[in-house]
Amino acid sequence: MHRICFVCLGNICRSPTAAGVMNHLIDHAGLNVQFIIDSAGTSAYHQGEPPDVRSRTAAASRGITLTGSSRQFQVEDFHRFDHIIAMDTKNLENLHRMARDEADHARISLMRDHDPNSPPGAEVPDPYYGGTDGFETVLDICEAACRGLLARLQAEPRATTTG
Ligand code: 4NP
C-alpha cells in the first residue's frame, strides 16, 4: 500500500489537482487498491472549502474530477502517509519545520522532483491570483510528476512471501 498526501498552501488549487490527477492515473492502471491518496494545505485559509472552481473546470475538461474539502496539514499526517509531497519550496520548508524526526523528514519530497524531465528544485507555480492558463499549467505539471511518481513506485521491489 502506498499512502500519499500532496501539500500546497491553500489546499484548493494545486494539491487537490495533484490528488485528482494521481487518482485518475491509478484508476486507469487498475491500481486503486494499492493506493491511498489525499491532500492538505500548510495554511487553514480555505478550511472546509471545495477545490477552486477554476481548478475543477480545468480538470473536468481532461476527464478528471477533483474532490474533497480543504484541510490543514497536521503533524499526525506524518504517521498517516508514506509520501508527503510539497508543491513548492515554501511549503516544502514548512513541512520540514513540522517534521519531528528523521523518519518524518524522509517522507517529504518536492512534487516536480518526481518528474524525470524537470530540473531539480522546480516548483508547481501558484495559479490562485492568475488567469486560466495557470490552471492548465498546473495540470500539465501534475500529470508529468504523477506519471514519474507512479512509475517509480511500481518499479519498487515489493515484500514477497516465499516458502
Ligand atoms: P493552492 O493555491 O495553494 O494551490 O491551493 C492558493 C490558494 C489560496 C491562496 C494562495 C494559494 N490564498 O492566498 O488564499
Image (cartoon, rainbow, N blue to C red):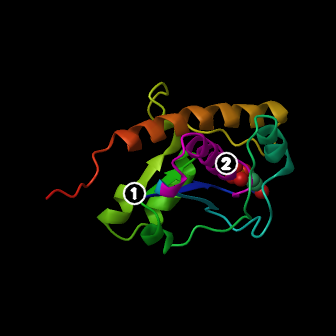
- Residue 114 seen in the figure: no
The quadrant of the rendering that contains the N terminus is: bottom left
Find out whether the residues at labels 1 and 2 contact each other: C-beta distance under 8 Å: no
Quadrant of the rendered image containing residue 88 = top right
Q: Is residue 160 magenta?
A: no
Work out whether residue 80 or residue 45 is closer to the camera in this orientation and state it.
Answer: 80
Residue 126's disc is none
**What amino acid is at disc 2?**
Gly
Relative image position of residue 13 (x, y in whole percent): 73, 49
Residue 111 lies left or right of residue 103; in this view the side is right
Q: Residue at x 70, y 43 (%)?
A: 126
Q: Secondary structure at mark 1?
A: helix
Relative side of 133 to 36, left or right: right
Residue that mark 2 sits on: 20
Which residue lies under the disc numbered 1?
Answer: 107
Q: What span is in magenta?
A: 10-33
Question: What is the residue that sits farthest to the front in this orientation?
Answer: 163
User: Disc 1 residue type?
Assistant: Arg
Whichever of callouts 1 and 2 sits on the residue coming sooner in the sequence is 2
The residue at 78%/46% (across/down) is 128
Q: Nearer the viewer, residue 22 or 159?
A: 159
